Image (tube, grey):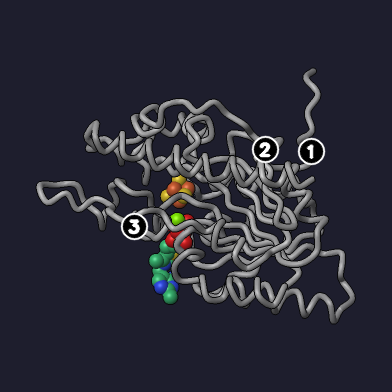
Amino acid sequence: MCPTTIPEEEHAHPGNTGCPGCGANLVMRYLLKGLGERTVISIPACCWAVMPGYYPSHCLKVPMVYCAFEATGASISGIRAALDVRGEEDVTVVGFAGDGGTVDIGLQALSGAAERETDAIYVMYDNEAYMNTGIQRSGSTPWGAWTTTTPVGPTKDYKREPKKDIMAIMRAHGVPYAATVSVSHPEDFVKKARKARDISGFRFIHALSPCPPGWRLNPMKTIEVARSAVNTRVFPLYEVEGGRVNITRKVKGRPVAEYLSMQGRFSHLTEEEVAAIQRTVDQAWSVLEREAEACDDRS
Ligand SMILES: Cc1ncc(C[n+]2csc(CCOP(=O)(O)OP(=O)(O)O)c2C)c(N)n1
Ligand code: SF4
Ligand SMILES: [Mg+2]
């Protein structure tokens, strides 16, 4: 049998109300494998708020608090304070929110929790739109994507603003640990989850989370598209620990067209638009690479 560093224990029961091929399902699964059972999760309105089902036929084996859409940061600060009063300092407190609930409506509460240095982990599963309410664009939807509020048609109303850089926002808060993870790279994911658990202070994890209905993607291609996002450098895997940048998966950079062509939400893009996305991706990668090299030089 092939040795693996992924723990066998499952902290969620099989079966929930997520769609076939849901990337967010795997984000939760790998996260809990990394964190273990001494975990409490706060989830705001999003797909994951409804996916577990109702207690007692709930799929999560760890306690879950359902908080208001904008309040994840405040909720995890409160849970942490309550556990500390009870002397339960070994419990890991997690905020688990979608991209809309993080980069848009929850940003103020997130910023407050990071600034207060709340001892908790905030995980944003990024399916790049408000999926639970019908695929509306969010600040995390990438440039050029179709959503129901950025339609494709003669007026070319598809998303015309760039994706908000949440990792840069969190780094600007000086958090002790921030990392990107992808469901296509579970060992890297579990390792980063464990590392985040063992650091104190406010930690942030940005998880790419393919969504077959929202991305107009074949549900069998979830892992393939997530891997393609990493291999094309659209979604680089890296971590920032104590201000030091470390690229955890150095890739040569496949053409972004490979990633885009797997998803119907980008099928309207012209060759020029794909080339423009390629330039943006190349530029972001070279900035990241220079930052990582500068950290290597300092050590
Ligand atoms: C204050 C408030 N506004 C709007 C909603 C409706 N709502 C519930 S889930 C959701 C979408 C959440 O999007 P995201 O955070 O990206 O998570 P996803 O659904 O994509 O998993 C919205 C708009 C709400 N519950 N509360
Ligand atoms: S809409 Fe997308 S994120 Fe929500 S359950 Fe379905 S696949 Fe998962
Ligand atoms: Mg979303």
Residue type for callout 2? Thr
Crowding around mark 1 (Cα neighbors within 10 Å: few <14, some 14 to 19, many 20+) is few
Across and down, in percent, residue 180 comes to 61, 47
**Which mark identifies residue 104?**
none
Label 1 beta carbon less than 8 Å to ligand 2: no
The local secondary structure at tag 3 comes to loop
Tag 2 residue: 248
Across and down, in percent, residue 127 comes to 46, 49
Tag 1 residue: 7
Residue at image coords 54%, 63%: 169
The local secondary structure at tag 1 comes to loop
Residue type for callout 3? Arg
Between discs 2 and 3, the one toward the N terminus: 3
Across and down, in percent, residue 80 comes to 75, 74
Residue farthest to the front, as pictured: 297
Crowding around mark 3 (Cα neighbors within 10 Å: few <14, some 14 to 19, many 20+) is many
Q: Are marks 1 and 2 in contact (CB under 8 Å)?
A: no
Residue at image coords 72%, 55%: 61
Residue at image coords 51%, 40%: 285
Tag 3 residue: 137
Across and down, in percent, residue 151 comes to 21, 51
Cα separation, mark 1 vs mark 2, equals 20 Å
Residue at image coords 59%, 40%: 289
| Res 188 → quadrant | top right
- Between 259 and 186, the residue placed more toward the observer is 259
Single out the mark in the foreground, 2 or 3.
Answer: 2
Residue 218 to residue 78: above or below = above
The local secondary structure at tag 2 comes to loop
